[in-house]
Every structure is written in structure tokens, then in C-alpha cells.
Amino acid sequence: MDLATIIGLVMAFGCIVGGAVVEGVHISALIQPTAAMIVGGGTFGAVFVSMPLPAIIGAMKAVKGVFLPQKVDHGQVVKDIINYATKARRNGLISLEQEAQSARDPFIKKGISLVVDGIDPQKLRETLEADIMAYEDHTKHSIEFYELAGGFAPTIGIIGAVLGLIHVMGNLSDTSKLGGGIAVAFVATIYGLLIANVICLPIGTKLKIRMKEEILRRVMILEGLIAIQNGENPHFIEQKLMAFVGGEH
């Protein structure tokens, strides 16, 4: 569980709602199903129009990574690569075949298999870089989903506000309906801003950070495997890879 995400959401909503209560606003005034339907449905409806269905499904699944991220340990990547390099230096590249079979990570498994098969280093780089680019493109679609939602939400909130005011203007003679219409108008704007600035844009930013961490991990693996294939000294390989993580193990 990513504590930063949980703490951030609790802090944001807690402070906003708490501040409203301190100012004398009743919680019930902030709960407007009509405004939620207009803003939520309108925002994500606009995003659905903007993006293909596979990208939308991928973005929905990506939310899990915001709350339950896969740990990326760059120091462990260095250790694993050094172990592979030491084994290959002692027993030859063919000795890594068992490592390929036991590897759980598909990227490492593919990379080691190509090394064992004796593929040309340039071809190895091109193949693994293509995998990295495919991962980046796929992840960017998820990021764009939430960035689009963050861009649409405030505008849809304004639409909700205008609809609420239209309702108010159409019922000026019935004072019993004025309060509800005005509440929907203002709350819709708040919902739009909250969806954008507390939920969607932060999710997009966190997914972007996760993507950069994973790309760095894969680039380290790529450079390490090429160095192993070239028969470089494990100590030199370690120094090269540690440069990616600022010298921290």
C-alpha cells in the first residue's frame, strides 16, 4: 500500500471538508447527487469520446498501481546483473540459460534468453529498446486518460453551475426551489475542481513517476546485459550501472 497516496487523499479531503465545516457550511450542502452525476458523468464521458476503449480499460487497471505499486529496487537490479555477469565470466554465456528459465520478470527473461542465443549486441539493444518504447507508449495512454479528465472536469463543473443557475432562473416564482438550484450550481463547480486537482491530475502525475522508475530499471537491465554479452568486467559493469542510481546501492 502506498502510504503517500492514502495520506494525501485523506489530508486533501479532510482539510477541504474540515475547512468548510469551520466556516459554518453543513456537510449535507456539499452532497449533491445531481451535481455529482453531471460532473462525473460529463467528465469521463468526454474522456471516453477522446480515447480508444483499450486505452480506457488500461487506464482503469493502472489505478491499482497508484495504491499498490510494484516495488522498483534499482540497487537489487545492480546486484542481479552483477551475479549474472560473474556467472557468465566464469562459466560462459550459456550458463545463464537456467537464469532465463527461472526469471519471473518477462523483460529480464527475454533479455537473458537473447544473450544466451548469441544475438548480435546491436540487435539485442534494438529488441529490448522496442520493448521499452512499447511499455512507455502503453503507460502514457493511462497518464493521458487522467490528464484529460483533469482538464475536462473544471469545465464540466462550470456547465453544471450554469445548469443549476438556469434551473434557478426558471423557478424564481417558486422560492422553495431556489436553494437547491443554487446549491447544485456552486457544488458542481467544487466537484469539478476536486476531481481535477485532488484525484485525476495527482493520479496522472504518480503514474508518470512510476513509469520513469520502471523505464530506468529496464534501461539498467538492457545496459547490463549488453555489457555481459561484451564480456566486460563485473566490477566495471557495477560502476556503470550505479551511475544510473546516483551511486546508491
Image (tube, rainbow, N blue to C red):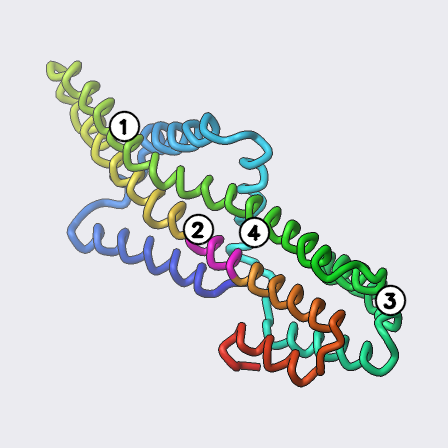
Q: Earlier in the sequence, mark 2 or mark 4?
A: 4
User: Which residue occupies 60% across, 34% down?
Assistant: 54
Amino acid type assigned to the residue bearing label 4 in the image: Lys
Q: Residues within 10 Å of mark 1 (few under 14, many from 20)?
A: many
Query: Which region is colored magenta?
Result: 204-212
Residue 208: say if magenta: yes
| Residue that carries the numbered disc 3 in the rendered image | 97
Q: Are marks 2 and 4 in contact (CB under 8 Å)?
A: no
Q: Which of labels 1 and 3 is toward the front?
A: 3
Q: Are marks 3 and 4 in contact (CB under 8 Å)?
A: no
Q: Earlier in the sequence, mark 1 or mark 2?
A: 1
Q: Earlier in the sequence, mark 3 or mark 2?
A: 3
| Residue that carries the numbered disc 4 in the rendered image | 64
Q: Which of labels 1 and 2 is toward the front?
A: 2
- Say which element carries label 3: helix
| Residue that carries the numbered disc 2 in the rendered image | 203
Q: Earlier in the sequence, mark 1 or mark 4?
A: 4
Q: Earlier in the sequence, mark 3 or mark 4?
A: 4
Amino acid type assigned to the residue bearing label 1 in the image: Gly
Nearest to the observer: residue 159 or residue 14? 159
Work out how far the residue at label 1 is from the one at label 4, CA to CA, in angstroms.
Answer: 30 Å
Work out how far the residue at label 1 is from the one at label 2, CA to CA, in angstroms.
Answer: 24 Å
Q: Which mark is residue 160?
A: 1
Q: Residues within 10 Å of mark 2 (few under 14, many from 20)?
A: many
